[in-house]
Amino acid sequence: MIKTIVLDEYVIAVLMRDLVGHDRVPSAFLVYLHLWGESERQSKAVIRASHQTMAEATGLSKSAVQKGVRCLVGRKLIRAQKDSATATPEYRVARPWRR
């Protein structure tokens, strides 16, 4: 069964244009949508996902996912944490416009 996920209007009206047009990192927008969706589907604040898993889920290359993650972390739109250098990262999606 497919679950409906509600996005904040800000994501489409502002964030997409910011990441794709201004930052020129469209992969960041897709990675953000993927992580938001997984967070909502799993009803979890923190999502554990490898770059390879995200690449397969979004249709992006692994290097495009890595670039997108770097951009999102730099913009503080996601927080990434790893238990060790080889561990699968945990991501928390930030929604700073909700403050």
Image: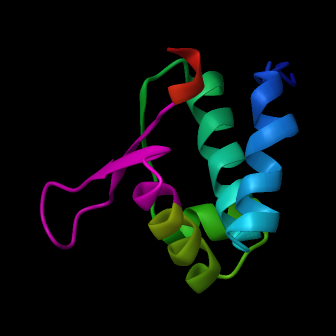
The answer to whether residue 47 is above or below residue 45 is: below
Please tell me how many numbered marks the rendered image carries: 0
User: Which of the two residues, 18 or 50, is positioned nearer the viewer here?
Assistant: 18
Residue 99 percent coordinates (x, y): 49, 14
User: Which of the two residues, 26 or 80, is positioned nearer the viewer here?
Assistant: 26
- Asked if the magenta segment contains residue 77, the reply would be yes
Residue sitting at x 68%, y 34%: 37
Left or right for 61, reference 71: right
Left or right for 54, reference 20: left
Give residue 54's quadrant in the image.
bottom right
Residue 12 percent coordinates (x, y): 85, 38
Residue sitting at x 48%, y 33%: 94
Colour pattern: rainbow
- Asked if the magenta segment contains residue 6, the reply would be no
Residue sitting at x 71%, y 44%: 33
**Region rendered in magenta:** 72-95
The answer to whether residue 15 is above or below residue 17 is: above
The quarter of the image holding the N terminus is: top right
